Image: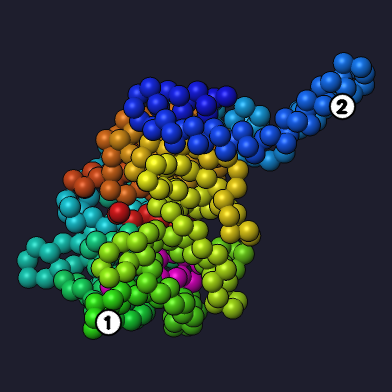
Amino acid sequence: MRKYKDAMDEIVRGELDITSAWHGVQDRIMKRQKQRRILTVLIATVIAGAPLLFLMSTLESSDPRPGGDASSATSSTSSLPRDAALDVAPLAHVGTPNNLSAIAYGFGSVWVTWWDNEGKRTSGFLAELDPETGEELARLEVPYSPWEDGSGSLAVGQNLLWIVGHQPGTTFSDVVLVALQTDPLRVVAEVPLADGDAGGVTGSPDGGAWATVVTRDKSGTESSRAYYVSPTTWLVEQQIDLGSMRGQDLVATSAGRLWVRGPILENGGLVGEVLKGFDLASLTEVATLPDVADIMWDGSRIWIRHADESTTYLQEFDETTGEVTGDPLLLPGNVQIAGQAGSGWVVGSKVQLVDLANMTTVSSAQVDGGEAVAASSQAVWVLKSDSTVVLVRVDGASSTGSTQGEPANQGVT
């Protein structure tokens, strides 16, 4: 009932189209028609027998799975208090305004990439920030700058940071995947990928990384490929043809699958945004999901932001079936998502903390948008175009709620 009330409140405020809201309610009604017919029969039987009443009470007290409707799910799987308040604190200015590329959280620090074209050459930079104070702990000039229009150009891997970039000051040139250790901060490998434009990058469970490169033929038609780099040989050992999809956001999972999200471009125009899955043993496509505007990895599960002409919502994605599962949470339009360890963060004109176990909004705070986001279980860092990093965290909690950052989907969009 909480979700239906939230939807009605959004309709009153003009944030949600009433037709979209009704479609969502109608879908829920259809899904539960069979259950209600069964309950009707059981209730009628209860009148004639108290023992059956006990049985029904037992069944109703069981929560079949986390992530269900808020009216029936329990909070026992969530560490988030229902009345959690959020603190908002601008931390620091970092990098060059309007030239920011990406932000990520991992290894106990916040990491920001940007490029600077002042002077005679363009350089890429990586800065390490204290997650609580915003103090700059280290800075490194990177030999290949992150993609200047980029998304997901920085990723936290198992043991390394990864940046996919190109030669400074150029586009459609040699794309290189850069591996960096964090203590001390230094480059440990530079792996050439292909001629083109740098796309996204994600760490792999085995310690390597996947990155995408966009190429363009003589007619101007774009295509892209994903490249896997081994952490032991520093060589490209696998490739996947992504076709006309511009791969931007990537997640590699322990189930042996690579998920790539991005727009489909034909004749220079956008024809849709999709999520594609590939089996890494056979390098074959196993699933395609349309209308996916964003993805996030919370450390164990994939979540998508679905967006079509009338509806935007957050929903869990089952990589085994290649389909969405559980109940959706309506979102206020064009937002960014990030998550970790059961907590989801929705960033737009305000930040919303979402309990992913119950798919309910726990709390919200005003931030007036951002260019990129990174998250732990207790906090989210918002990177703004003026180079300000804003920390939003659960009141009274440490921002470093987990030690590993989200491995993908951290870049400027």
**Amino acid carrying mark 1 in the image:** Asp
Answer yes or no: is residue 175 visible: no
- Chain part drawn in magenta: 197-211
Whether 70 is among the magenta residues is: no
Q: Position of residue 141 (x, y in %)?
A: 23, 66
Q: Position of residue 260 (x, y in %)?
A: 45, 64
Q: Position of residue 126 (x, y in %)?
A: 28, 60
| 116 vs 327, nearest the viewer | 327
**Amino acid carrying mark 2 in the image:** Leu
Q: CA distance from mark 2 to mark 1?
A: 67 Å
Does 34 sit left or right of 216 as displayed? Answer: right
Quarter containing the C terminus: bottom left
187 over 399 or under it: above or below: below
Residue, disc 2: 55
Does 214 sit left or right of 125 as displayed? Answer: right
Q: Are marks 2 and 1 in contact (CB under 8 Å)?
A: no
Residue, disc 1: 217
Q: Position of residue 346 (x, y in %)?
A: 41, 40
* Circle nearer the N terminus (2, 1): 2
239 over 54 or under it: above or below: below
Answer yes or no: is residue 246 visible: yes
Whether 200 is among the magenta residues is: yes
* SS for callout 1: loop
**Residue shown at the point (45%, 48%) measured from the top left:** 306
| 141 vs 149, nearest the viewer | 149
**Residue shown at the point (48%, 50%) measured from the top left:** 304
Characterize the local packing of mark 1: few (<14), some (14-19) or many (20 or more) Cα atoms within 10 angstroms: few
Q: Please, what is the dominant secondary structure of the magenta stretch? A: strand
Quarter containing the N terminus: top right
Residue extending farthest to the left is 119
